[in-house]
Amino acid sequence: MTTAPYIGRFAPTPSGHLHFGSLVAALASYLDARAVGGRWLLRMEDLDPPREEPGAQAAILKALQNYGFEWDGEMVRQSERHEAYDQVINRLLSQGLAYACTCSRKQLEPYQGIYPGLCRNAGHDTKDAAIRLRVPELAYHFNDRVQGPFRQHLGREVGDFVIRRRDGLYAYQLAVVLDDAWQGVTDIVRGADLLDSTPRQLYLQELLGLPHPRYLHVPLITQPDGHKLGKAYRSPALTADQATPLLLRALRALGQQPGPERVDASPRELLDWAIRHWDAGKIPRTLTLPEAQIR
Ligand code: GLU
Ligand code: ZN
């Protein structure tokens, strides 16, 4: 028996319930894995307890189950991985690749999100400070399976970025890279809002000697005002009674063409059909997709 080399994952943040946009991302990563006999893992990105919505973790699992998704192995929680994150941060600090930053939000306001390196050589104590990673004056690029070539100059477009916040919380950029490598993820399929995080993640992989996964960024589903769907824009939760119609709609958003006879299928039957017919080449090559445009 040969094991398929593909390992994919879905990595929701429990700051709210899943919505149609999350369904599109979950479905794409699930189908892309299962269509080649790959594994599909579930990871709860619960790095930020103050922003976690009570009950969201359970609601996410329930929604995935109601919509027919089955993941491999035990779900992993980032809240149980702090020791691993800490070890890497300490290593980066001792190698001089990361440093403590005491800049206030107010101080950084004029720089429009690109950290100007004020604390780079200040030698601040790490206590009560954010930890930033030094970035090289280099462009990082990769070829996204849907969005095509993407490049970003880390020095000019991002600047030294935070890997641990001043309040002690670990940053998404660090945790996602460590966990994807730790879980052996070969293929990252997620929303296009994370396209411009990818060069930072490529740099971290390079720095830590980790393999680069393949990337596929699906269009971000947007509201009429152009915003991402989410809690703030009152997108409805994925209720069990809507599973078949919403799965059909998510499939169409991904360019797949389930026939009209599928309206009576169960979620599981629909997913099985979609695995057999999955064609990532049909995903619209666009960063955003207004929800109203999807039939
Ligand atoms: N936790 C992130 C989110 O919910 C996704 C992280 C990823 O897929 O890399 O937006
Ligand atoms: Zn600083």
Image: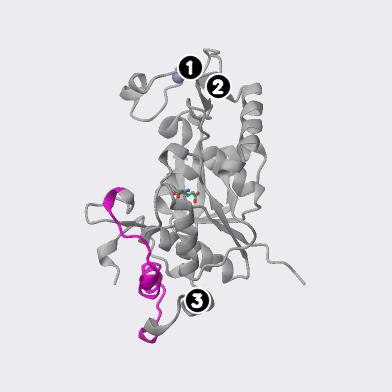
Instruction: Say whether residue 109 is magenta.
Output: no
Secondary structure mostly seen in magenta is: helix
Instruction: Give residue 99's mark.
Output: 2
User: How crowded is the residue under tag 2: few (<14 C-alpha within 10 Å), some, or many (20+)?
Assistant: many
Q: Identify the image quadrant of the C terminus.
A: bottom left
Q: Residue 268 carries which label?
A: 3
x, y (%) of residue 214? 57, 55
Question: Tags 3 and 1 in contact by the CB under 8 Å rule?
Answer: no
Amino acid type indicated by mark 1: Cys
Say which residue appears at 72% left-offset and 67% top-offset.
3
**Sequence order check, earlier mark of 1 and 2:** 2
Image coords of residue 250 (percent x, y): 38, 68
Question: What residue is pinned by disc 1?
Answer: 119
In the rendered structure, the answer to whether residue 63 lies left or right of residue 287 reads: right
Mark 1 sits near ligand 2, with its Cβ under 8 Å away: yes
Q: Can residue 207 be seen in this view?
A: no
Measure the alpha-carbon separation of dots 1 and 2.
8 Å
Q: Which of 17 and 173 is in front in this view?
A: 17
Q: Nearer the viewer, mark 3 or mark 2?
A: 3
Q: Are marks 1 and 2 in contact (CB under 8 Å)?
A: yes
Q: x%, y% of residue 90?
A: 64, 26
Q: Is residue 250 magenta?
A: yes
Earlier in the chain: of badge 3 and badge 1, it is 1
Q: In which quarter of the image is ligand 2?
A: top left
- The kind of residue on which mark 3 rests is Arg
Residue 152 horizontal side relative to residue 214, left or right: left
Disc 2 is placed on an element classified as: strand
Dividing the image into 4 quarters, which one contains the N terminus?
bottom right
Residue lying at the far front in this picture: please name it.
55
The magenta-colored residue range is: 232-261
Asked if residue 110 is positioned above or below residue 80 in the image, the reply reads above
